[in-house]
């Protein structure tokens, strides 16, 4: 819990990690320890992408049945309406960013085209007054993507993760299922 003008306030936690690092499972454990949970699933499933559908199914199977699930690619709007004192888990910012770039048809646009959307998300996270856990991929640790869209995503998520880390009270990097506290 962080302190805000002398009063305790629920903390905002950013959980970063690579693909299959265990970041979502770690975040789910953090959320489960708080009691009631509102899970915000940010993906926009493509019915033709069977691999992604299987990933979504595994996440659904792992979640407790008493969690409230909100499927929305508009995470900022969901955070603007806390709905209850339940902890909120947003999983994940990478699928959210992909949905925003798709919605804006911005894969070939200049960097920063999604800036109004990312600004709204960061502002919503910074203003959130209940327990919040945000999961995001850390993609800046590897090979330079061979495509323009890959580089665009890497650059946008890297800049967004930095801003989210500043807005959050604590941050973790999950590697091989092991969380390392960054902040």
Image (cartoon, grey):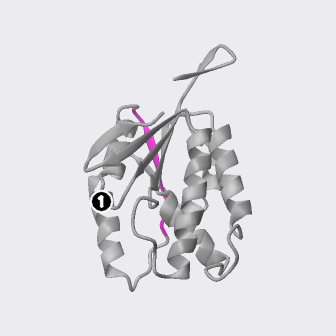
Q: Nearer the viewer, residue 129 or 16?
A: 16
From the viewer's perspective, tell me whether residue 146 is left or right of residue 123.
Answer: left
x, y (%) of residue 32?
Answer: 35, 37
Q: Is residue 66 visible?
A: no
Specify whether residue 139 is painted magenta.
no
Dot 1 alpha-carbon crowd within 10 angstroms: few under 14, some 14 to 19, many 20 or more: few
The residue under the point 31% across, 67% down is 55
- What residue would you read off at disc 1? 20
Q: Quadrant of residue 91?
A: bottom left
x, y (%) of residue 82?
Answer: 61, 42
x, y (%) of residue 76?
Answer: 64, 53
Q: Nearer the viewer, residue 1 or 19?
A: 19
Q: Residue furthest right?
A: 116
Q: Nearer the viewer, residue 165 or 151?
A: 151
Q: Secondary structure at mark 1?
A: loop
Q: Quadrant of residue 28?
A: top left
Q: Residue furthest bottom?
A: 48
The residue under the point 55% across, 32% down is 169
Specify whether residue 41 is painted magenta.
yes
Q: Bounds of the magenta span?
A: 35-43
The residue under the point 37% across, 82% down is 49
Q: Residue furthest top?
A: 6
125 above or below 51? above
Instruction: State the count of labels.
Output: 1
The residue under the point 29% across, 59% down is 20
x, y (%) of residue 159?
Answer: 60, 56
Q: Is residue 128 visible?
A: yes
100 above or below 50? above
């Amino acid at each position: 819990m962080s302190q805000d003008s002398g009063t305790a306030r629920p903390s905002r936690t950013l959980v970063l990690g690579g693909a299959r690092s265990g970041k979502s499972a770690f975040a789910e454990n953090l959320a489960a320890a708080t009691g009631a949970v509102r899970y915000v699933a940010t993906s926009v499933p493509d019915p033709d992408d069977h691999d992604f559908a299987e990933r979504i199914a595994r996440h659904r199977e792992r979640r407790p049945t008493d969690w409230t699930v909100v499927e929305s690619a508009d995470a900022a709007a969901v955070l603007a309406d806390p709905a209850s004192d339940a902890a909120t888990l947003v999983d994940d910012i990478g699928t959210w960013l992909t949905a925003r770039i798709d919605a804006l048809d911005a894969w070939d646009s200049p960097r920063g085209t999604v800036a109004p959307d990312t600004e709204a998300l960061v502002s919503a996270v910074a203003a959130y007054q209940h327990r919040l856990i945000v999961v995001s991929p850390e993609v800046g640790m590897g090979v330079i993507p061979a495509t323009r869209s890959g580089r665009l995503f890497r650059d946008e998520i890297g800049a967004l993760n930095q801003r989210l880390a500043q807005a959050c009270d604590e941050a973790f990097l999950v590697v091989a299922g092991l969380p390392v506290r960054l902040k």
